[in-house]
Amino acid sequence: MGRREQREQIFKLLFRVEFNPKEEMPEQCQLFFEDEENGIGEKDASYIQGKFEKIQDKLPEIDGMINTTAKGWTTSRMGKVDLTIIRLAVYEIKFDEEVPESVAINEAVELAKKFGQDESAGFVNGVLARFV
């Protein structure tokens, strides 16, 4: 599984956070990785789980950055898909030295095109452009 596919799986796992209480997330993670449709091998699962947990640990800080940087928008007003994509990308831009900023933004825009609404890609790109 390539980085793009791993990133997509991380997005899907992060998206579950929006609909499940924090204390249920360990069980949700287990269900996610047991789902045969995801086709996630052990090595990929380890990478995905690790990055998911790192993002979760930084979530208050990430949301604070988004709220300060996104002019006229707060995390509470953003659509859940867009917010999840932006959170993932902000983590990669600010905390993941393995991912170049331009790659993080491009991959976020691609996720927005695939999972978001018609205007999601432009919105995500606009918000993330303020971080670099």
Image: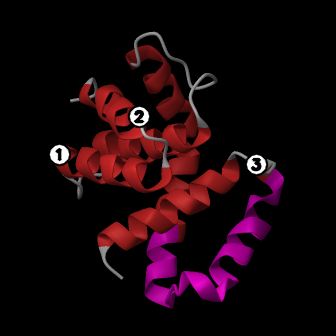
Residue extent of the magenta highlight: 23-48
The residue pinned by badge 2 equals 119
Magenta span includes 17? no
Q: Nearer the viewer, residue 100 or 81?
A: 81
Tell me, yes or no, whether the two marked residues, 1 and 3, touch with CB atoms within 8 Å.
Answer: no
- Looking at numbered disc 2 in the image, what kind of residue is underneath it? Glu
51 or 84, nearer to the observer: 84
Q: Residue furthest front?
A: 118
Q: Residue at x 33, y 67 (%)?
A: 4
- Looking at the rendering, in which quadrant would you find the N terminus? bottom left
Q: Which amino acid does label 1 sit on?
A: Ser
Any mark on residue 11, and which?
A: none
Near mark 2 (Cα within 10 A), the count class, few <14, some 14-19 or many ≥20, is few
Q: Is mark 2 on a helix, strand or loop?
A: loop
Query: What secondary structure is the magenta-colored segment mainly?
Result: helix
Disc 1 to disc 3, C-alpha distance: 30 Å
Q: Position of residue 83 (x, y in %)?
A: 52, 37
Residue annotated with mark 1 = 102
Horizontal side, residue 91 vs residue 34: left or right: left
Circle 3 sits in a helix, a strand or a loop, which is it? loop
Q: Is residue 105 above or below residue 123?
A: below
As drawn, 40 above or below 22 = below
